[in-house]
Image (cartoon, grey):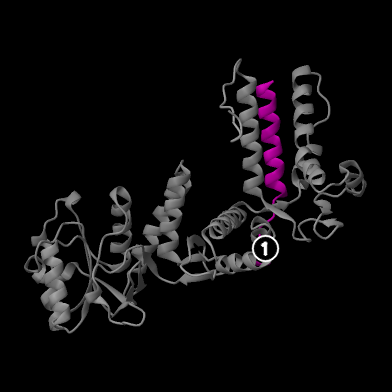
């Protein structure tokens, strides 16, 4: 029975793949709006972000306003380590024009240790960003020299931690054309010199993050080779965590990142709104990845009709009946939740004989679900089916299932 259910499910997934349609920029708004609980304003905001960049993240806004920030350039989630580096008091930003960049995870205990890199920068009247670990003494010395205008500089801590830090620093070294001085490769401070510095067109550092604009002398061939390697690794990676991290790295190098800051008038409202925006962002990303299907339970209901009707094998026939029944339940449940008669609503859909033809509950009309903007990401629909089948067949293959009983607060 389990083998038959899994085999039929594979056929349904193949059917859904064939029926999925590539999402257009116009349809992005529909996907995002539906996932944001039919909030058209939020949907348009999210869709607009995806029209500009490939990767969008969500964060809380410090104000009641919800807005989008599109970052064109590499983004590092690290801000300046001292207010002495701020060059624009109004925005509290340090802006470095045409700067050099030093990358190191070797702790710098004093500025004399990196004098070979600093002196040429000072002589040229240029600025430098240090991405590395500075001891308190070294940081104080840098603060003093910046305050006295002996040098134009800024310092931030390396991004992230552990293996993620090493990967992100490697990305920076390739984009900036810099050498990454690391303990893991046996480097020490004596090796740091002017030739190992990278270059950028412009760098903007605030208290929370750093934006690096690529220099015109960047080695595009090296960057493209690195991107190809990351994309291959992304296809081969097996965990969602690793896939997402690789996708962020690719987007950060290749095109930029969008951040949607969710604002509200209270913590409770912000949490609810944040969850809706996060769901919508993930839904749009899934739609872009694997396309879209008719929503409202229609895609699965159509898929049930694609399953063979009869089999001489009693076990396979039972599996067919189970899946054909299960695949129409989402449609039936949606109609029941809306207070409608599922049989009455379904009859015109069945009579049409058209794939993707369904009922738009919000506007109370029949038609092509995709054209009416009632759509689901194909990836979400497929994963829902796979997860449901996995749970059902796991229970089917066991004799006992143990689960925690939920207890209402009033129960004793």
Identify which residue is drawn at 65% across, 42% down: 382
Q: Could you say whether the residue bearing mark 1 is in a helix, strand or loop?
A: loop
Magenta residues, as a range? 1-30
x, y percent for residue 61: 48, 66
Identify which residue is drawn at 44% across, 72% down: 72
Give the residue at the far top of this rendering: 399
Identify which residue is drawn at 44% across, 46% down: 241
Identify which residue is drawn at 69% across, 27% down: 5
Q: Quadrant of residue 336?
A: top right
Q: Is residue 96 magenta?
A: no
Q: Is residue 87 something one can see in this rendering?
A: yes
Residue nearest the observer in this picture, 362 or 154: 362
Q: Quadrant of residue 65?
A: bottom right
Q: Quadrant of residue 118?
A: bottom left
Crowding at label 1, few (<14), some or many (≥20) Cα neighbours within 10 Å? some
Residue receiving disc 1: 39
Q: In which quadrant of the rendered image does the C terminus lie?
A: top right
């Amino acid at each position: 029975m389990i083998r038959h259910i899994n085999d039929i499910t594979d056929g349904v997934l193949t059917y859904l793949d064939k029926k999925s349609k590539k999402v257009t920029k116009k349809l992005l708004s529909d996907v995002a709006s539906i996932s944001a609980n039919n909030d058209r304003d939020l949907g348009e905001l999210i869709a607009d972000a995806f029209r500009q960049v490939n990767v969008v993240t969500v964060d809380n806004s410090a104000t009641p306003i919800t807005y989008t920030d599109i970052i064109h350039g590499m983004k590092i989630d690290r801000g300046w380590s001292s207010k002495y580096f701020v060059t624009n008091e109004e925005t509290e930003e340090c802006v470095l024009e045409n700067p050099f960049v030093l990358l190191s995870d070797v702790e710098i205990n004093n500025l004399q240790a990196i004098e070979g890199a600093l002196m040429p920068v000072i002589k040229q009247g240029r600025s430098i960003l240090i991405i590395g670990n500075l001891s308190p003494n070294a940081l104080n010395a840098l603060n003093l020299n910046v305050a006295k205008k002996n040098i134009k500089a800024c310092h931030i801590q390396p991004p992230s931690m552990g293996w993620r830090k090493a990967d992100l620093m490697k990305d920076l070294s390739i984009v900036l054309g810099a050498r990454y001085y690391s303990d893991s490769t046996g480097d020490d401070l004596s090796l740091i010199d002017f030739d190992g510095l990278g270059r950028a067109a412009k760098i903007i550092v605030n208290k929370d993050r750093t934006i690096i604009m690529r220099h015109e002398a960047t080695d595009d061939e090296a960057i493209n080779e690195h991107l190809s390697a990351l994309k291959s690794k992304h296809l081969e990676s097996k965990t969602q965590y690793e896939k997402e991290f690789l996708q962020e790295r690719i987007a950060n190098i290749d095109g930029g990142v969008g951040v949607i800051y969710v604002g509200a008038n209270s913590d409770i409202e912000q949490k609810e709104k944040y969850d809706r925006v996060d769901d919508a962002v993930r839904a749009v990303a899934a739609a872009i990845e694997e396309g879209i299907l008719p929503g409202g339970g229609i895609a699965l209901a159509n898929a049930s009709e694609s399953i063979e009707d009869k089999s001489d094998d009693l076990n396979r026939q039972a599996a067919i009946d189970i899946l054909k029944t299960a695949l129409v339940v989402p449609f039936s449940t949606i109609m029941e939740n809306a207070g409608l008669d599922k049989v009455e609503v379904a009859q015109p859909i069945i009579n049409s004989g058209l794939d993707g033809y369904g009922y738009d509950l919000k506007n109370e009309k029949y038609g092509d679900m995709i054209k009416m903007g009632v759509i689901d990401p194909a990836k979400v629909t497929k994963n829902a089916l796979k997860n449901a089948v996995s749970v059902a067949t796991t229970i089917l293959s066991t004799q006992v299932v143990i689960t925690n009983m939920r207890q209402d607060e009033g129960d004793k």
